[in-house]
Image: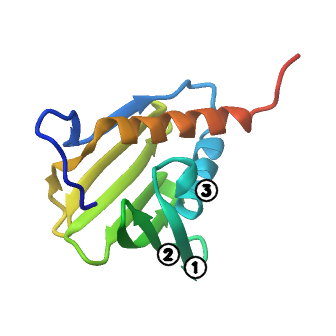
């Protein structure tokens, strides 16, 4: 993601992890992760989102406006490993959203297209907000006990 930032801002850098309650079923977390592909505006400060299913359930092409910049991505879903890869079309960046069901940890990080983990130069607060929103939406999918 192309962003101009001040030097004192807390950045994602090499990744961010967020612990979810173990009581949330992994299927709920996955459903919300997939919803973020089609409705990122619920999680991130973006608008004008367009998606095209290339291979339903496996590959989505997505464009969205991020602060006046049109971000174009090929998005790949790997439900067996609870992993979504967002491959930027016009850059060397690949963003990962990964859920580890045995530890209930969400892991967001960035690699280059060679598979090397690289610093992600966006504000940590943006990613933490998306992770918190994922938790809240996954919890709402759970049956309510009265």
For marks 1 and 2, the one nearer the N-term is: 1
- Local secondary structure at mark 1: strand
Residue at the front extreme of this rendering: 68
The reply to whether the C-beta atoms of the residues labelled 1 and 2 are less than 8 Å apart is yes
Label 2 secondary element: strand
Alpha carbon distance from label 2 to label 3: 14 Å
Q: Earlier in the sequence, mark 1 or mark 3?
A: 3
67 or 56, which is in the foreground? Answer: 67
The kind of secondary structure element at disc 3 is: helix
Residue 65: x %, y % from top left: 43, 66
Determine which residue is flagged by label 1.
53
Is 18 located above or below residue 134 in the figure?
above
| Residue 141, quarter of the rendered image | top right
Residue at image location 26% in from the left, 41% down from the top: 15
Closer to the camera, 74 or 55?
74
Alpha carbon distance from label 1 to label 2: 6 Å
Q: Mark 3 — residue? A: 35
Residue 25 located left or right of residue 44: right
How would you rate the neighbour count of disc 3 (Cα within 10 Å): few for under 14, some for 14-19, many for 20 or more? some
């Amino acid at each position: 993601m192309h962003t101009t930032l001040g030097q004192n801002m807390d950045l994602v850098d090499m990744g961010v992890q967020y612990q979810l309650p173990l009581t949330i079923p992994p299927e709920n977390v996955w459903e919300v992760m997939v919803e973020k592909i089609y409705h990122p505006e619920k999680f991130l400060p973006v608008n004008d989102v367009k998606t095209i299913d290339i291979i339903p359930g496996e590959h989505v092409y997505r464009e969205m406006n991020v602060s006046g910049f049109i971000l174009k991505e090929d998005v790949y879903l790997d439900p067996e490993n609870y992993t979504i890869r967002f491959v930027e079309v016009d850059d060397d960046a690949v963003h990962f959203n990964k859920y580890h069901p045995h530890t209930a940890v969400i892991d967001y990080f960035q690699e280059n297209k060679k598979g090397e983990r690289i610093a992600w130069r966006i504000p940590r607060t943006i990613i933490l907000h998306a992770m918190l929103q994922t938790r809240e939406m996954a919890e709402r999918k759970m049956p309510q006990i009265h």
